[in-house]
Amino acid sequence: MSTNIQAIRGMNDILPPETYLWHHVETIMRRILQSHGYQEIRFPILEYTELFKRSIGEITDIVEKEMYTFLDRNQETLTLRPEGTASCVRAGIEHGLLYNQIQRLWYMGPFFRHERPQKGRYRQFHQCSAEVFGLVGPDIDAELILMSALILEKLGIKQLTTLQINSLGTALSRTLYRKELIKYFNSNKNNLDEDSAHRLHKNPMRILDSKNPEMKKIIENAPKLLDYIDQDSRNHFEKLQEYLTHAGMAFEINPCLVRGLDYYTKTVFEWTSDKLGAQATVCGGGRYDHLVEQLGGKPTPALGCSFGLERTVSLVQQTEHNHKAETILHAYLITDSEESFIVGLKLANYLRSKVPGLKLILHCGGGHLKNQFKKADKSEALYAIIIGEHERKTHSVSIKSLREPIPQQTLYQDELAEYLKLKIAKKG
Ligand code: ATP
Ligand code: MG
């Protein structure tokens, strides 16, 4: 006997009825993004490895440990995308979308990181992201944050989350801070874990993003970047806070928030929740004013944010949200013979095209009417539609409620669409 082949560790199958919950989350996100003027962009799942190395930074968790990188048959080094911003910028430059233009783009899909799988952390996961190009001021930072808040609100999970913001200044203003940080961590050298010791001189700011709980204390006492950033970044950050306050948006300033990728400048933010266990961040984002240039484009200010969909779905699951309405099957059509099936096949398609939202299963696989009735009942459909010899000859159907004790009815086939429309409308 051959053994079963199983899914790759950390890569999940998403099964019905949970897929309905995913639809719900995706639909709300899409709707809100579009209502803010964002347009969808799609790019490949594979890119040249160099793209991610150059953008995310060589000394980061993602590039050092998490990328799915391999040689393809042409001996080219390719990587399964670990995040979307780099690809989005690459595509924007390649197709001339960015230079001297304002773009609001969004995308949704799977991403891949070879992390240690645990609750909320997988090797294939999904993100829904927004990116904006060509706007330099804190006005758009504020609008992006408010948009992410509206997504959480419309999903009914905003009360489970808090907003944290910080400013990383510019790369230039970080030079002095970097020196201070190295000095501080050097004096605590014996308390650094292996990763942090390795990063001390190469990329000390990454130490601040360590997920190791034992590093928490020494990170908390480290010098704060906010005390070192340049005046322009400072003004930007203050204006952002002013906008958020005017909009009634509560936030916390978290001076330790640096995010896991090297390309961020000025504003960074995260929505976190204490309902997600150790993986607390449901959405993260920030400004990356130098990335376009770094990837070969003309200097273009930019910013973006990403929702982790697994974590978002997990929060929605903890609310009262009921996606039962979407799973309801309205009708199950059964037939007593080959001739009746031919009529049913045509009628089923006609009904689906005429009745918006109708969910109807046509019984396939034959069998006695009695057995087909059992299948109809098991399907949890609201109605069974029956075409037997009599119905076929009189162009009618019998319709029987499977959930309410009301007598079976006979209707002409051309009355059925209107009848179902009314019934569906009633069910909401
Ligand atoms: P974390 O701090 O949790 O490692 P990150 O900073 O690496 O997250 P980003 O690259 O900013 O994450 O990705 C944005 C969002 O995508 C995260 O806030 C999270 O919700 C989600 N995400 C990131 N990595 C994973 C993963 N391995 N599994 C599930 N969701 C993830
Ligand atoms: Mg990470």
Image: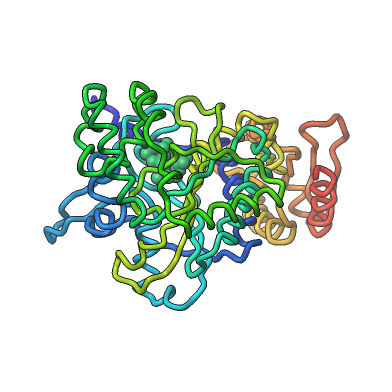
What is the residue that sits farthest to the left in this orientation? Answer: 75
Please name the residue shown 48% across and 70% down the image. Answer: 134
Which quadrant holds residue 152? top right
Towards the viewer: 248 or 313? 248
Percent of width and height locating residue 44: 35, 60
* Residue 175 located left or right of residue 28: left
* Residue 374 located left or right of residue 175: right
Please name the residue shown 56% across and 32% down the image. Answer: 273
Please say if 210 is above or below 225: above
**How is the model colour-coded?**
rainbow
- Is any part of residue 339 visible from this angle? no
Percent of width and height locating residue 315: 58, 33
Towards the viewer: 19 or 229? 229
* Residue 21 located left or right of residue 300: right
Please name the residue shown 86% across and 29% down the image. Answer: 405
Total numbered badges shown on the rendered structure = 0
Please say if 378 is above or below 100: above
Percent of width and height locating residue 102: 52, 72
- Quarter of the image with the C terminus is top right
The quadrant where ligand 1 appears is top left
- Quarter of the image with the N terminus is top left
Please name the residue shown 63% across and 62% down the image. Answer: 36
Percent of width and height locating residue 339: 64, 52
- Is any part of residue 172 visible from this angle? yes
Towards the viewer: 174 or 379? 174
Which quadrant holds residue 388? top right
